[in-house]
Amino acid sequence: MGASTRQVLRKNAHGVFLAQWSSEYLDNAKASYADKTYSEKKLAFTRFFLSIDPTALPINLHPGPLLKHFQKEAKERTGNAANKDRKNLIAAWNWRLNTSRVGREKNPFVLTDKQRAEEWPRYIRQSKISGRCMGSPKKGRTRSWS
């Protein structure tokens, strides 16, 4: 982002633009999360800004264009991938509400439906010795989490 773009972003009287919000969130995410998680969040914003104007105001976001974005992502990639992006954008919006003095408007990403996703059964490895699932407590014992 160039210096002139930063100046325009700061002069906005109605709040921050989506690009500035995402930049601030990603700075926080880089310091708070593992590299893989940070990359996932950054890619979610990169794909999001291919569909939504980064100079738009967050207050102008509505579920309609967001749903179209997630439907496009589900069609081009998978429903699981679109839902993962949705999850990351929901987290970013919640961070925005918690760290700024903006109004408590509803999270527009939450108002969009999840995309249809393939569900796969989870594999649970069984012990060769006892035939029990690994990690399950012995009979009569409870697992201690302390």
Image (spheres, grey):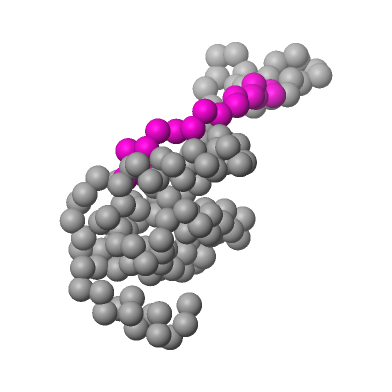
Res. 17 image quadrant = bottom left
Q: How many marks?
A: 0
Outermost residue to the right = 128
For the point 62% across and 18% down, the residue is 138
Depth check: 12 or 107 in front? 12
Image spot of residue 5 (x, y percent):
40, 80
From the viewer's perspective, tell me whether residue 56 is left or right of residue 49: left
Res. 9 image quadrant = bottom left
Image spot of residue 25 (x, y percent):
41, 63
For the point 51% across and 65% down, the residue is 30
Image spot of residue 6 (x, y percent):
38, 80
Q: Tell me: residue 122, above or below residue 132.
A: below
Depth check: 138 or 74 in front? 74
From the viewer's perspective, tell me whether residue 136 is left or right of residue 32: right
Residue range of the region highlighted in magenta in the rendering: 108-124
Determine if residue 87 is in view.
no
Depth check: 119 or 62 in front? 62
Determine if residue 55 is in view.
yes
Q: Tell me: residue 48, above or below residue 16.
A: above
Depth check: 3 or 143 in front? 3
Q: Tell me: residue 68, above or below residue 132.
A: below
For the point 47% across and 64% down, the residue is 26
Q: Tell me: residue 45, above or below residue 5.
A: above
Magenta stretch contains residue 42: no
From the viewer's perspective, tell me whether residue 63 is left or right of residue 87: left
For the point 80% across and 18% down, the residue is 129
Outermost residue to the bottom = 3
Image spot of residue 140 (x, y percent):
55, 14
The overriding secondary structure of the stretch rendered in magenta is loop
